[in-house]
Image (cartoon, helix red, strand yellow):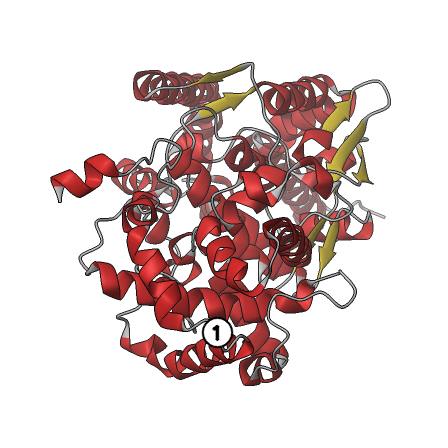
Amino acid sequence: MIDDEIEEDDGDIHVSIFNVPNALRDINPNAYTPQLVALGPYHYRRFKLQEMERYKISSAKRFQNRKQSTKLHTIVDQLIMLDHRIRACYHKYLDISRETLAWKMAIDSAFLLEIIDIYSNKEGKFLCQTSSKIVDFARRKSVYNTILRDIMMLENQIPLFVLRKISNYWFHSSNMVDEILDDVLVGLCKDVSPFKMLNWAQIQPSSCAHILEFLYKRLTPKVEETVEIDENVNQGINEERRLCKLLSQLKESLHQIPLKAVFKLPWIFICSLPGLAILSAVVLPKENNFENPIDTKSTQDNMPPLFEEIMIPSVIELSKSGVTFLPVNGDIMSINFDQKSKKFYLPTISIDDNTEVILRNLVAFEASSTLGPLVFTRYTEVMNGIIDTKDDVRLLREKGIILNYLRSDEEVANLWNGMSKSLRLTRVSFLDEVIDNVNRYYEGNWKVLLSRFMNACLINSWQFLVFIVAALILSLLILQVLGSLLYNSRMVGPHPQG
């Protein structure tokens, strides 16, 4: 084995098909595990996926029958010679023989090429030119979407050089194979991409290791000036936020203690007077209404880490402060906030049954393959930050930023709120600049400041309002008592003689 591997030249082959990190998988395992068809060596042993194997075998037979002079055994022999290059693409150790892996690659590639052949835009030019029962079967919407989701999963990828190698057996010109295959892959990624109206010519599929990487490179711009936040800085951020929160709570407590003392002590005496005990239920706060420090600490411990959701107002809050949301046709790079015109520009995104799986696998691929900043992950954090409820989704949908093909706006809100998990923090210059500009505008907006002042004076000082109400009630009672005493004194007093 040592001698064979020394002879191989895999300097241009890098690991590109990774295991999904457990921190991401545990949130939604079904988003990373194929539900209908296994492609590649990671999931082919799963019993649930065995039903599709007969369809894959049928695709391989049709592939073989298309050109009688070439048998599948010949292709397998060629793939065995490429065994080291194939294994170099997978992060996980593949505990299967060379022959098994070669047959797996040949059969799965034939099936995949037959499925995606429908995306060819070249008139009269196809990769397979065969009639597949699974394609007809897959035209049912639910099954078709399931197959598309499985094709786009990180652990279900097949190296593109294997697809090109197999396609070369049916064409005389390798340039024709590249042209048709690239056209098919562009059509597939256009169909599943959540962002529409993009210039797909900027990235060529031939420069990518697999389909998911092609989609990722097209959706994610290259950002050079970024700063990555390591674990120590991450801890510092959390400690700083906890300290600020503690100081804020202490300051609030110091403001409330004198008010409670002034409010409570006189009314303990007043409410103890005969006939006024009923006021204690209205005026004096019950001790068991205050939060238990132990329960509060337990609740905070169960909450997700502070850094998982960025600090930015929601869509509804920004809209109330005067911000207008506008859709733009483009990728993540088109996100912008103009403080002068108070316009927030966001790319139009289409949300359907496949979107969550595709977004999560793009995040997983970025976290596994990218050493630098997690640009796409940062975008999902921005969307998670501005979307809290279905009302936020409704406003973005009405503005044309979100094209919702799910059953409700609440499902879209749950989708974005579930995307908050990140393996590590990074700072992306253009996105963080947008976040800072939005926060700076919001914190300085007079509507926001007025609302906070009213909340501080009225809502947070409810004891003072109760005091005023109780004082009015007491004044009315005193007037009533005085009036009764005056009336009785007149009734029992000496009558004038006449």
What is the crowding at mark 1: few (fewer than 14 residues within 10 Å), some, or many (at least 20)?
Answer: few
List x then y, in percent, for residue 155. 38, 54
Q: Secondary structure at mark 1?
A: loop
Q: Which quadrant of the figure contains the N terminus?
A: top left
Position of 282 with respect to 409 (left or right) is: left
Q: Which of 305 and 212 lies nearest the eye of the viewer?
A: 212
Relative to 472, does residue 73 appear above or below in the rendering? Answer: below
Relative to 33, does residue 458 appear above or below in the rendering? Answer: above
List x then y, in percent, for residue 289. 39, 44
Q: Decide if residue 319 is in sight here.
A: yes
List x then y, in percent, for residue 49. 35, 76
Q: Decide if residue 43 is in sight here.
A: no
Position of 328 with respect to 41 (left or right) is: right
Q: Which residue in the structure is indicated by mark 1?
A: 69
- Residue drawn at (51%, 36%), measured in percent from left and top? 377
- Residue drawn at (53%, 74%), measured in percent from left and top? 67
Relative to 176, does residue 124 appear above or below in the rendering? Answer: below
Task: Looking at this view, name the residue that lies furthest to the left.
Answer: 2
